[in-house]
Image: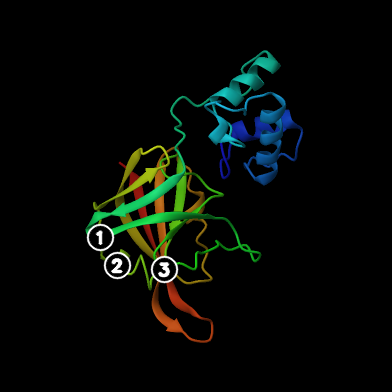
Amino acid sequence: MDLGSSGTNVVELQTYFAINITGYFDSFTQSATQKFQTEQGIVSSGNPETTGYGRVGPRTMLRINSLLEKEYIIPSTDETYSGLPMRLKIPEINVETNFEYMGLTLDGTMDMTKSLNNVVWFNLGPRPGENGSAVIAGHYAGIFNNLHKLSKGDKLFVEDEKGAITAFVVREFQTYNPDADASKVFTLNDGKAHLNLITCEGTWNEISKTYSKRLVMFADKE
């Protein structure tokens, strides 16, 4: 479980931590998890779950279960935990670039890099390759200027900090107005791993300093 997860397991986790029960793994749940991991010595030098600080993996689940002396929170046996994304490669449009990690701006929208040549991974959601919808954004007048040229079935690849490469296959494209409800880009959680790429398209508005449309490419883990 990680930021963005939801369901019964999250409710049970929040019940155990005695925090507000929302059924959604939010920043408060993450903070409670980090506190628990530190107190229990789960996160320490050389510990294999150190990179999962604040993320509920098998070691954290087993520790909670052992303290409760029952299977209160059941570990998911099919969930994978990926390393931090480092490189994005899209051979069909000659893209190979580095990642930056960003969350939300003060007005609640996804933050964006000033670099035209890098992409941004939304680090409040799943990592590419994990269950749920990992989201990446890039500038239309830069690294993603040819994103619209991809077709269904084309492949893209994410290399993580450990050198592991995960392949994704393009499923479809959708266009949104800037003020449209695009929550499904971030929140789809069907037990599978998805990768959604966002950029702009349309006409440039000199007053608002932005384009008139948002283009989203939906891809699924191969």
Element carrying mark 2: loop
Q: Is residue 15 above or below residue 132?
A: above
Decide which of tag 1 and tag 2 comes sooner along the chain: 1
Decide which of tag 2 and tag 3 comes sooner along the chain: 3
Which residue is labeled 2 in the image?
146
Whether residue 74 is visible here, answered yes or no, is no
Seen in the image, is 83 located left or right of residue 16? Answer: left
Q: Residue furthest bottom?
A: 207
- Please give the name of the residue rendered at 66% of the width and 46% of the height, measured from the top-left corner: 27
Q: Quadrant of the N terminus?
A: top right
Disc 3 crowd rating (10 Å Cα; few below 14, some 14-19, many 20+) is some
- Identify residue type, mark 2: Asn
Q: Do residues under tags 2 and 3 come within 8 Å of each other at their CB atoms?
A: no
**Distance from Cα at disc 3 to Cα at disc 1:** 15 Å
Disc assigned to residue 94: 1
| Front label number (2 vs 3) | 3
Q: Is residue 47 above or below residue 99?
A: above
Name the foreground residue: 7 vs 205. Answer: 205
**Distance from Cα at disc 1 to Cα at disc 2:** 9 Å
Number of marks drawn: 3
- Identify residue type, mark 3: Leu
Q: Do residues under tags 1 and 2 come within 8 Å of each other at their CB atoms?
A: yes
Q: Position of residue 79 (x, y in %)?
A: 46, 31
Which residue is labeled 3 in the image?
116
Q: Position of residue 129 (x, y in %)?
A: 41, 41
Q: Quadrant of residue 217?
A: bottom left
**Distance from Cα at disc 2 to Cα at disc 3:** 13 Å
Q: Position of residue 41 (x, y in %)?
A: 67, 24
- Please give the name of the residue rendered at 66% of the width and 22% of the height, measured from the top-left corner: 64
Decide which of tag 3 and tag 1 comes sooner along the chain: 1
Q: Is residue 55 above or below residue 73?
A: below
